[in-house]
Amino acid sequence: MLLIPILIGVTVIVFGIMVLTPGDPAILMLGENAPQEDLVALRERLGLNEPIYVQYGIWLARVVQLDFGRSIRSGRPVTDEIVSRLPATTELALLATLLAIAVGVPLGVISATRPNSAVDHTATVVAFTGLAMPVFWQGLVMILLFALVLGWFPPSGRLGGWEYYVLPTITLGTSAIAAITRMTRATMLETLSQDYVRTARSKGVRERSITYRHALRNAMIPIVTVIGLQFGALLSGAVITETIFSWPGIGRLAIDAIRSKDFPVVQGVVMVFALMYAFVNLVTDVLYAYLDPRLKTRYS
Amino acid sequence: MATTTKVIPQRRRSWFTLMRSSPRTAIGAVALAIIVLAAVFAEAISPYPPNQQNLRSRLQPPSAEHLLGTDHFGRDVLSRIIYGGRVSLQVGFIAVGIALAVGGLIGLLAAFYGRWVDSTVSFVVDVLLALPGFLLALAIVAALGPSLTNVMIAVGIANVPQFARITRSAVLQVIEMDFVTAAHAAGSRDQRIMFKHVVPNSLSPVIVQVTLSLAGAILAAAGLSFLGLGAQPPTAEWGSMLNSARPYIRDAHWAVTFPGLAIVVTVLALNMVGDGMRDALDPRRRD
């Protein structure tokens, strides 16, 4: 219900960022040596002579039709620039999320079922270090070790085989692995101490079944929440990961746009990131109802 | 007088107990103390000035002369890391200070006055949280232009919603308590109740958030500097050191490895201390 007002609020922020930008957008677009009449015509076309709220209205009307204007650098429509690069970012973000779930959840479960064991201590160290490791440094260390020294994987690029995906996916997924491991361990420890788990044990249910069918299912809501939140961190990480590995996604597009003061592209990318994040949050909310039937009953 | 003498030993004991019961927190606190002391006394302990170039000894591996090697301008990596710590901590503290001042105040006002103030603040916080923090900071720096000051402002603004939320929920709990009702009944002014009674009793979760946000702010600021949007050369800052050493990674990995390790250790120490404080202050988390 609140999604639309929040997204409108995001458009105010993104538009506000353009207003904050020092300098005349018309000069930024046409260059300092552009003829005066061209500048006047462009200001008129963009509505830059209107009051701020009218400018926002004009801009918003275009944005809801997915028209972010044209890139100052390439002259192409911003939407085309984003659409051509979106698949690269989406596949990287999805792969990193899948990796984080595939490693983080089992590691957290094993850690919780064997507290204070070697596995548990290892998982704790992995989680703490993973959360403290800057994605840009990790990316560089991975390139140094696995591309330049060992030569196992290519140091950059995307088009090629699966080997191009390994280093960027691990780099991007590491902090999410750490966060998911910690949350899984904490919630599993709590659910494993519940009465229904003790009852199941006393009835002779197999430990594996107790862990995965009874405890993990009930621990899933906080885990899904952290996965959803991590997706936001992952989008942020994608900006840096794509820059390090020359990955042709929208994160790298944003950095190139910031460096060349291509503000329509920056606005477009930030809006797309906000939409992706909002969509994942929506999916997370839907998953809550699937995981906890009580929520479905309460709101139906 | 008697009250004062009672309170101080209790506080000392609780810190001592926290450190003794959680070795992880103790290790984090010691590491953090070393990093802060190194940053404060950088002039005294750095073997070389951070920007002193020596092109004849560029890209030298670690040796007795240069413990962590030299970079592509022949600058001493250890000295730059020590001075870089000063910059990173300063950026972290100022960014979190901005977030605490703005977020704390609007969270306090939202919880204290409720009604439309609360609804408006909650909506603004939800909108800010709809954008991942680093992306918001990136967009703000893109607008304001690359500089360390703008990074502090941007990272500070990006952290405002967390502080607003935490302060709001902490204050909401406190304003329900009897002493606040009593202060209202005694005719105290809103401002006095807020700053004399409510704020001091709502500080615990906010202090924990400060520690954890410091780690995030240092990471974000280093990330922005790595992208060339924060500290500009020749400033010794960990993120920009990594960025400038990047082309030489094959020949001089130490110029990349050690500044990165400095970030990891600092963030790890802050997270350890923050986690320890959270566990100590939240009775549900105590084993």
Image (cartoon, grey):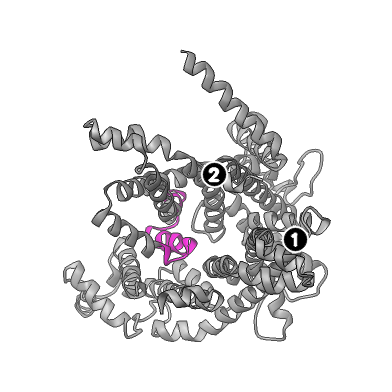
**Residue, disc 1:** A111
Range of magenta residues: B129-152
Quarter of the image where one finds residue A257 = bottom left
- Callout 1 amino acid: Ser
Binning the other alpha carbons within 10 Å of mark 2 as few (below 14), some (14 to 19) or many (20 upward) gives: many
* Residue A204 visible at all: yes
**Residue, disc 2:** B211
At 58% from the left and 32% from the top, the residue drawn is B40
Horizontal and vertical percent position of residue A98: 65, 76
Residue B127 shown left or right of residue A104 in the figure: left
Cβ–Cβ under 8 Å for marks 2 and 1: no
Quarter of the image where one finds residue B119 = bottom left
Q: Is residue A45 above or below residue B170?
A: below
At 28% from the left and 74% from the top, the residue drawn is A34
Q: Residue furthest front?
A: A203
- The count of marks equals 2
* Residue A279 visible at all: no
Horizontal and vertical percent position of residue A299: 41, 76
Principal SS element in the magenta part? helix
* Residue A201 vs residue A11, the one in the foreground: A201
Horizontal and vertical percent position of residue A88: 57, 82
Queried whether the magenta region covers residue B137, the answer comes back as yes
At 66% from the left and 72% from the top, the residue drawn is A101
